[in-house]
Amino acid sequence: MNIFIFGAGYSGKAFAAARPDAGIAIAGTTRSAEKFGALEAAGIVPLRFDGSSISGEIAGALADTTHLIVSIAPDEGGDPVLNLFGDLLREKMPRLAWIGYLSTVGVYGDHKGAWVDEASECRPVSARSRLRLEAEQAWLALGREKGGLPVAVLRLSGIYGPGRNTFVNLRDGTARRLVKKDQVFNRIHVADIAGALWHLAQRDLGGVFNVTDDLPAPPQDVVAYAAAKMDVEPPPEIPFETAELTPMARSFYGENKRVSNALMRQAGYGFRYPDYRVALDSMWADGSWPGGRTDARSPMRRG
């Protein structure tokens, strides 16, 4: 396998760190040369991509790519990877066997707390989710144009893991317990994003998959659980109606749904961290919660 990641950020580095075979080549892009060291530490050959031009290095790496992962958000101009590399993807990547596109459960929009799965109606509320849905459709169409090339769309819930979790927020004094009646969110540990990607890529499985945990839960419950693990006082509850929030933060609370991962399980993937309690317990026990280069690897080896 020769793997190329457009947008090798938090999830991309976790994916690379979890590779099952050290002989698998992985290259990935970042906008800043200052991030090259972090990518190299995760086992990724770093390449700079500014979102507006094709370098010879990237074109050369894509020519040998067998598995492509896209983790770059679209904008009002469309998907930047498809815009720039669409012709190359269609005509000059003879070894390409699979594409994975990282999307969001935000494409489902608001379902008033009801359960949704991959067959549910998508009715995105925010502009960013609408653009994601359009990008999903464009990538799936590309797969059809290439004679049925498998394209896996992974719809991700709120991402957390080492360095990005409620323990960190409590330590830094940024945790808040916002309370909105009947509001729930799903979450996904970054190790399960990596695991799901490897599961699908190694089997060249295409389709739309929800990559999310089993336990949609009120956000204030997660904060209280983490505070109890740390043996600290949780922050006070704040009614959503009176909370000071950015427009983007407030928009997240405008969508309420419970997202099923049954299809991903039917595809044979077993989640390492099926709910936030299991994940927080594990990160607290092994000390990986603050993050860091070595800590990022330990959850991948567990469970």
Image: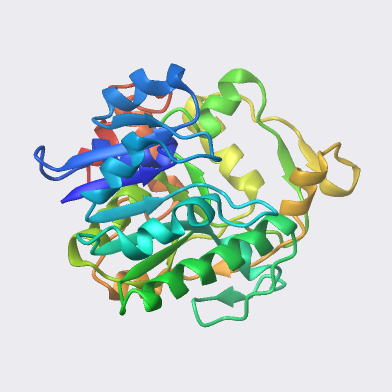
Viewer-closest of 249 and 58: 58
Viewer-closest of 85 and 105: 85
Residue 256 location, quadrant? bottom right
Horizontal relation, residue 153 to residue 123: left or right: left
Image coordinates for residue 6, horizontal then vertical, percent: 41, 44
Horizontal relation, residue 117 to residue 123: left or right: left
Total of numbered circles in the picture?
Answer: 0
Residue 266 lies, with reference to residue 258, above or below; the image says: below
Image coordinates for residue 140, horizontal then vertical, percent: 44, 72
Residue 68 in sight from this viewpoint = yes
Instruction: Identify the residue at the far right of this view.
Output: 242
Viewer-closest of 126 and 296: 126
Image coordinates for residue 195, horizontal then vertical, percent: 28, 52
Viewer-closest of 159 and 218: 159
How was this image coloured? Answer: rainbow
Residue at left 85%, top 40%? Answer: 243
Residue 213 in sight from this viewpoint = no
Residue at left 65%, top 60%? Answer: 131
Residue at left 59%, top 25%? Answer: 170
Image coordinates for residue 267, horizontal then vertical, percent: 27, 73
Residue 119 lies, with reference to residue 170, above or below; the image says: below
Residue at left 23%, top 67%? Answer: 204
Residue 19 location, quadrant? top left
